[in-house]
Amino acid sequence: MSIQVAIIVSVILMGVLSVITFFIGKRVSSRIIKYIPAMATGAGIVFFLIKLNFIPYKTHVYEGINDMIAIILLSIIFGFSLVGAIIIEIIKRKNSI
């Protein structure tokens, strides 16, 4: 699978997960909505890890390197989005007290 197809599949997967989480958050609890970016990037990381570990590279050896770069970038984004959601949660709790 080429990196272009992998990125398109990953974006579609993350978008579908974001929409599902948004609708669940509207019905169940609005507190879950602020964690949508973290969940979506987590799904992207899982997709690229599965692709890296279970799909063999016979023709293009450099695809594994591209997958590792994508995992690193998504991990950085995951960390920032998780820290942002936690900071928002702390600020909301301070204001409600």
Image (cartoon, rainbow, N blue to C red):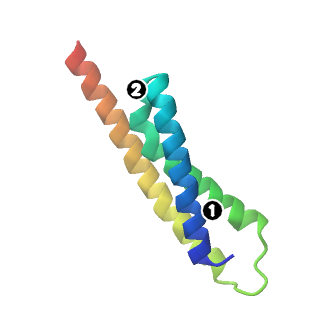
Relative to residue 16, is residue 97 depicted above or below? above
Nearer to us in this view, 35 or 82: 35
Position of residue 29 measured from the top left corner of the image (x, y, whole percent): 45, 23
Q: Secondary structure at mark 1?
A: helix
Quarter of the image containing the N terminus? Answer: bottom right
Judge from the rendering whether residue 8 lies leftward or rightward of residue 34; answer left or right.
Answer: right
Toward the bottom, the furthest residue is 59
Residue 48 circle label:
1
- On screen, residue 91 above or below 53: above
Image: 42 above or below 12:
above
Q: Can I make out residue 8 in this image?
A: yes
Q: Which residue is mark 2?
A: 30
In percent of the image, x 43 and y 46: which residue is there?
A: 37
| Residue 50: image location, x then y, percent | 70, 59
Please, which residue is most extreme toward the left here?
Answer: 95
Camera-nearest residue between 69 and 15: 15
For residue 33, side relative to residue 69 (left or right): left
**Residue occupying image coordinates x 23% and y 15%:** 96
Mark 1: give few (<14), some (14-19) or many (20+) Cα within 10 Å: many
Q: Give the image quarter of residue 77.
A: bottom left
Q: Secondary structure at mark 2?
A: helix
Q: CA distance from mark 1 to mark 2?
A: 29 Å
Instruction: Identify which residue is drawn at 75% across, 78% down.
Output: 57
Q: Quadrant of residue 55?
A: bottom right
Q: Is residue 69 left or right of residue 84?
A: right
The image's mark for residue 34 is none
Q: Is residue 69 left or right of residue 48?
A: left
